[in-house]
Image: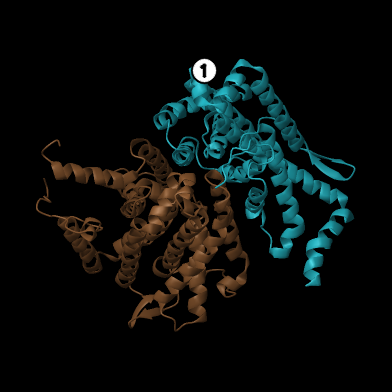
Chain colours: A cyan, B brown
Amino acid sequence: MTELLYGIAIAPFKDMVGSPAFFAEVLIGGVFAGLMYSLVALGFVLIFKASGVFNFAQGVMVLFAALTLVGLLERGVPVVGALLGTTAVMVALAWVIERVVLRPLVNQEHIILFMATIGLTFFLEGFGEMVWGANVKKLDIGIPDRSFIVTGVQINQLEMFAALTAAVLVAVLGVFFQRTRVGRALRAVADDHEAALSIGIPLKTIWLIVWSVAGIVAIVAGIMWGAKSGVQFSLSLVALKALPVLILGGFTSVPGAVVGGLIIGVGEKVGEVYWGPLVGGAIENWFAYVLALAFLLVRPQGLFGEKIIERV
Amino acid sequence: MIYREAGQFKTSYASDQAIFPIAQDRWFVGLATLAAFVVPPLAASEYWLQAVLIPLLIYSLAAIGLNLLTGYAGQLSLGTGGFMAVGAYAAFKLTTAFPSLNIIAVFVLSGLVAAGVGLVFGIPSLRIKGFYLAVATLAAQFFLVWLFNKVPWFVNYASSGTITAPNRTVFGVIVTGPNATAPVRYVTALALVVVFALLAKNLVRGRVGRSWMAIRDRDIAAEIIGVRPLRTKLLAFGISSFYCGVAGAELVFLYFGSAETFAFDITLSFLVLFMVIIGGLGSILGSFLGAAFIVLVPILLTNAPQSLGLHLPVALQKQLELMVFGGLIIFFLIVEPRGLARLWQIAKEKLRLWPFPH
């Protein structure tokens, strides 16, 4: 019993202090994983804020974007052209989704829309695989993937690049939401659909914009993830990990998505390395959900979310 | 005017509120059930029993379970696979620990174990709902599957990590295990599903079901008219998990024969959710229709191109299957959010009036 307590409460911390370089590497790995979750979660938040739709298909949109990009690159399209082409495809996808899925389901319950996006997930998964093939692909758009060592800690250039990109993306989105006309319209729609409509904000256009922006965020996430571990179908599973991130950060907060992602990423990596062996490992699979579950009981609206949750 | 109900007067509340108030319906369902017991075991081939009818019945039971929770009580759950795993592993532990215990009793007991686990994971539903609850049930899904994977006690320290259905008999006939014939397993699954479907039907039209629907439609109003949210929601979780647990136990004992935790991963949860959506949220009949749809569509998609003379690669078939699934889900949500059961109901009403418009 004391041995178990020692294993839980003392040994992991001793290990952390004992080899700070390794601990730092675990932390960096966690931050990187967390950023990936954040990028997916960002797409969720954007769509949820503007249309109240919980877009389960965000993960598969990441996959679809990455697949399209790789597919275009493989056919000899230059990097810039491929990026533009992928953006065009994602905007077109947003248009089709708005037209075919969302518009007929206007005024339905949230849960129906949620399930429709689950259907969308399956459709896109099959469609992407059919068009671009099912093999694991290497995505290479020229981001260097070398490692260098700073005071004994191994740092990967790609991870640094990803962190920078995420920071820039969040800043751009922040400016977009707070300082531009479209951003203001988006916030108005998020606040109250009917009031926004009555003062002349075109709801359909707004939805199209939001889904397009989410598509572009998906491209960024797809590039990062694809460069790190190849484009493959496990990517769509990241969508599920984004759910606890949202719970932690709050469903309506852009910074919340980033912070939540970091907490989940770091938490699960540190937990896996230091506490995982005690229970046989692989706790990464459920750690995020259980953390979110515990968090829900204390603070249901998340760290930064608005208190919209109704308690029964 | 395929059939008339003229002259069938309802002279008591009992006859008015019967499950099948129309005599023709009663006869039809009775005969259909009888036919289901007699015809397939005699006529159907091993392939049809094993690959189509047995999974159909088992998935129907799971779909009824999820429908009670999501369709009737309005609590979205993505943890069905986890609860089914609880049922399967509980059944395995029970029947290996007490070999003389009747296998039907084992199924029911493992359902009760799953109900207990479901109650625990239902507790968050008292504070949260909707998507938040979905995440909470995802925690159940991943945690439970991980648990069965990691703790060797659950598989009796088998090095392969699989659970295998041993030979067990009911009335002297081998029902489970490698020596059980497909017709026997089919009849067992059918008997269980008939009993549990009838139970569920009565549950949802009684006091419990009405309180579930009240909570689903507007929880605050329900609380005001005296429905206790705590008790009602937990009951929904418990009973739903019971059904899922029995279905999970059946899945291993009557269908797979042996299974690893992989069989109960998140895909299974989604599969059952789709059955419920396509079949119809809040309908027992819909659970059957949805299960039939999900089991039959892949078979159809596999065989249709071949019968048309096309030979599609296996990968393409898989992708088409995904696309058709996804497309159909969106299609059904748009056209008829209440699913196949509602379409059936509309067709029936039309047939009652035909050829008159009103």
Left or right of A23? Residue B21 is left
Instruction: Choose top left, top right, bottom left or bottom right for residue A189.
Output: top right
Residue B218 in view of the camera: yes
Identity of the residue drawn at 75% across and 55% down: A273
List the residue tagged with mark 1. Answer: A201
- The answer for which chain carries disc 1 is A
Identity of the residue drawn at 35% across and 47% down: B280
Left or right of A51? Residue B179 is left
Q: Nearer the viewer, residue B120 or B329?
A: B120
The amino acid at mark 1 is Ile
Q: Secondary structure at mark 1?
A: loop
Q: Identify whether A150 is placed above or below A191.
A: below
Left or right of B162? Residue A278 is right
Identity of the residue drawn at 86% across and 48% down: A21
Q: What is the x, y in percent for residue A106?
A: 43, 30
Q: What is the x, y in percent for residue B264?
A: 50, 59
Q: Identify whether A90 is placed above or below A148.
A: above
Q: Identify whether B83 is placed above or below B219.
A: below
Q: Quadrant of the N terminus of chain A?
A: bottom right
Residue B261 in view of the camera: no
Q: Nearer the viewer, residue A255 or B157?
A: A255
Q: Identify whether A104 is placed above or below A19.
A: above
Identity of the residue drawn at 50% across and 15% down: A200
Q: What is the x, y in percent for residue B15?
A: 21, 59
Instruction: Choose top left, top right, bottom left or bottom right for residue B209.
Output: bottom left
Q: What is the x, y in percent for residue B246?
A: 43, 66
